[in-house]
Image (spheres, grey):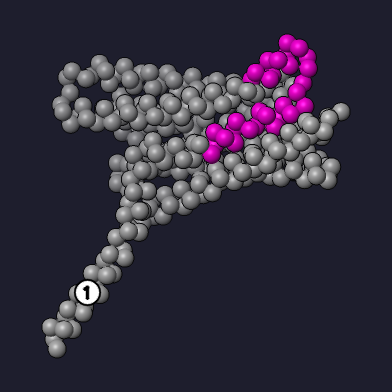
Amino acid sequence: MINDQTKTNGFILSWVSLGFNTFACLISCLAFLTIIYHLYCNHVKREDKITVVLCVHIYLTILINGIILISMNIRSILGDLYNQSFDSSWCIFSGYLSVIFLTLLYWNFLNQAFYRLIRIVYSQNRQFQSLKLYIMLPIIEIIILTSIVLCVLLPLNGVTYLPNDYFCCLTFTNIPGILSSAFVAYICPLCCISFIYIHITRFIRQQGNIQTLVVKQQQSRDLLIIRRILIIISLLLILGMPALILVIMFIITGEKNPLLARIAYFPVTVSQAGLSVALALSIPQLKNIVLNLRRSNTVMPFNRTNQGAIQMRTIVGIQ
C-alpha cells in the first residue's frame, strides 16, 4: 500500500508535470502554426526550407506527445482525488502511442543530423537534398517504428495499466520490454546522431585550410549550430537518467519505487518544455522567423503613423 506522504508527493508531481506539458504544448503549437504560415506565404528562403520543415516535424511530435502526457497527468490527478479507475482499451492505446511518438522525437533529430551530413559532407548528392524526401520521411518512419514497437512490446505485454498511477504506460519493471524500447528509442538514434556529428566535425576541420573565406564562414556557422544541437541532445540524454537509475535499482534490489512511472516521465515533460524553447534559439532559420515576426509587429504602427502624417501634409498642401 502507498502511504499518505507518497500519495501527496505523487499528486504534486502530477500537477508540476501538467504545468510543464501545458507550456510545451502552447509553445510547440505557436511555433508550429507560425512556421506553417511562413511556409505557406513563401517567406522562407529556398535553401532554408528543408531545415524549417525538419523543425516542423519536431514541434508537431512534441505537441502530440505533450497532449498524450497531459491526458496522463489529468488521469493521475483525478485518480488521486477520487480514486477513479481509467483502465480501458483507449488507455492502453494511448500508452503505446506515447512510446511511438517519444521514439519518433529522437528519430526526428536523427533526420536533422542526416540532412546536415548530406548538405555539408556530401553536398554534390542532390538526391538526398529534396524537400519532398524530408516531408515524407517522418511518415515512412512512423509506419516502420510503429511496426517495430508493436512487434516487440505486444508479445511482452509492455504497456499495462498502473493502478497506483491511474494511467497506462510502458511497464518499467518489465525488463525485456524496457530494454527493447530503450534500444529503438534512445540507443540506436543517439549513437547514429553522435557518429554523424563527429564525422561532420572531422570533415570541417580537415577542410579548414583549403576553403575560401565564404566557405569558412559557413562552416563556422555549421559548427556553432552543431554544438547547440549536441547540447540539446545531451540534455535529453541526461534528463532520462532518473528513470534509468530507478530501473537499475529495481534490478539490483528487487524493490520498486511506488512513483517510478511518474518520476520517469517527469524529466520527459521538463525536456520537452525546454526543447520547445531551445530549438527556436539554436536554429538560425527559426530565430530569423521569430525576429521577422517581432519586426513586423513593431514596424506596422510606425508605417501607419507616417502614412497618416503624409496624408495630413498632402491635405494641407492642397489647401
**Could you tell me which residue is drawn at 73 percent across and 34 percent down?**
10
- Residue 138 image point, x, y percent: 50, 37
Kindly give the residue lying farthest to the top in the view shown.
Answer: 252
For residue 4, which quarter of the picture? top right
Q: From this viewpoint, is residue 92 visible?
A: no
For residue 241, which quarter of the picture? top right
- Residue 224 image point, x, y percent: 32, 28
Residue 249 on the magenta segment: yes
**Could you tell me which residue is drawn at 35 percent across and 31 percent down?**
225
Counting every numbered tag in the picture gives 1
The quadrant of the picture occupied by the C terminus is: bottom left
Q: Nearer the viewer, residue 281 or 197?
A: 281
- Residue 202 image point, x, y percent: 31, 16
Residue 114 on the magenta segment: no
Q: Principal SS element in the magenta part?
A: helix
Q: From this viewpoint, is residue 254 visible?
A: yes
Q: Identify residue for label 1.
A: 309
Report helix, strand or loop for mark 1: helix
For residue 46, which quarter of the picture? top left
Q: Nearer the viewer, residue 131 or 258?
A: 258
Provide the residue span drawn in magenta.
Answer: 244-273
Q: Nearer the viewer, residue 83 or 38?
A: 83
**Could you tell me which residue is drawn at 64 percent across and 43 percent down?**
18
Kindly give the residue lying farthest to the left in the view shown.
Answer: 317
